[in-house]
Amino acid sequence: MMTERLGGRRRQPIIFCDFDGTITQNDNIIAIIRHFNPPGWEALVDEIIGERKSIKEGVGELFRLLPVTLKQEMTDFVIGNASIRAGFQELLDYCRKQEIEFYVTSGGIDFFVYPLLAPYGIPQNHIYCNGSDFSGPQVEITWPHACDDHCHNNCGMCKSTIIRRFPKEQYKRILIGDSVTDFEGAKLADLVFARSHLTTKCTQLGLPHFEYITFHDVIAILKQEENND
Ligand code: MG
Ligand code: ZN
């Protein structure tokens, strides 16, 4: 068991795992927008990347470019094209065995996050993502997990807000991610698994982290940590 003693009390290990580019190999929002190619998306993506628009504003505007009549086609596209990173099922099995709590903290949207995760049996209340409303003419993203008073980034789905609900006195907080949007959460975590842009950001700012390619790498480090405890 990966335990840690703090004033004689065991802290519960808990994983916060990103979805797009972490559980899936690629970013599904970008894949959808690129595939359906509505006029104006490239300028919006540039504004998000250049941080002239928050993720919440930018993603909201991107989906407003798409008519709701594409719902089924978009869902089928993502399910047909997304691939899950190797070792994901094994990581979930390992967490179950070791009593590590596993949460998905995703900036993705419910209409593709839930179907892609359906085969893995993760309870719905352990999956945080954005919502969607297909009742109007254009797709409207809803934001059930927006930033708390401590975060001013207008994240949309605010990972650090979720992580703060699990205090460090009680939980050993572990983050797995791939992008700049995981960095604020990484700063709160005891243990960080990074790839891609998150690795670059952690390296630049001197935040300790382990690099991973597959979830088998993550399991190997978790086992090592367990032996160190
Ligand atoms: Mg990601
Ligand atoms: Zn936030």
Image (cartoon, helix red, strand yellow):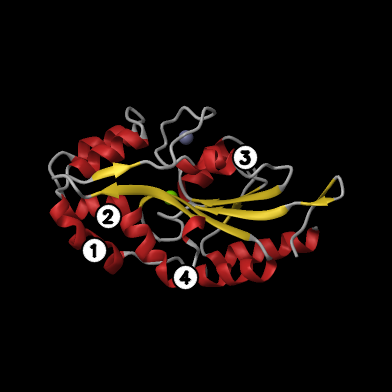
Residue at the image point whose x is 16% and y is 38% from the top: 40
* Residue highlighted by disc 4: 120
Which numbered mark, 2 or 1, is in the foreground of this view?
1
Q: For the residues marked 2 and 3, what is the alpha-carbon distance in whole angstroms?
A: 30 Å
Viewer can see residue 193: no
Q: Answer few, some or many: residues within 10 Å of disc 3's Cα (few below 14, many 20 plus, some between 14 and 19).
A: some
Q: For the residues marked 2 and 1, what is the alpha-carbon distance in whole angstroms?
A: 9 Å
Q: Earlier in the sequence, mark 1 or mark 4?
A: 1
Quarter of the rendering containing residue 144: top left
Numbered tag placed on residue 188 in the rendering = 3
Label 3 CB sits under 8 Å from any ligand 2 atom: no
* Residue highlighted by disc 1: 77
At label 2, which amino acid type do we have?
Ala
Which numbered mark, 4 or 3, is in the foreground of this view?
4
Q: Answer few, some or many: residues within 10 Å of disc 1's Cα (few below 14, many 20 plus, some between 14 and 19).
A: some
Image quadrant where one finds the C terminus = bottom right
Dots 2 and 1: beta carbons under 8 Å? yes
At label 4, which amino acid type do we have?
Tyr
Q: Is residue 157 left or right of residue 171?
A: left
- Give residue 151's position: percent from left, percent from top: 50, 30
At label 1, which amino acid type do we have?
Phe
Q: Is residue 87 left or right of residue 82?
A: right
Q: For the residues marked 1 and 3, what is the alpha-carbon distance in whole angstroms?
A: 35 Å
Q: For the residues marked 2 and 4, what is the alpha-carbon distance in whole angstroms?
A: 22 Å
- Give residue 8's position: percent from left, percent from top: 87, 49
Q: Secondary structure at mark 1?
A: helix
- Give residue 184's position: percent from left, percent from top: 54, 37
Dots 2 and 3: beta carbons under 8 Å? no
Image quadrant where one finds the N terminus = bottom right
* Residue highlighted by disc 2: 31
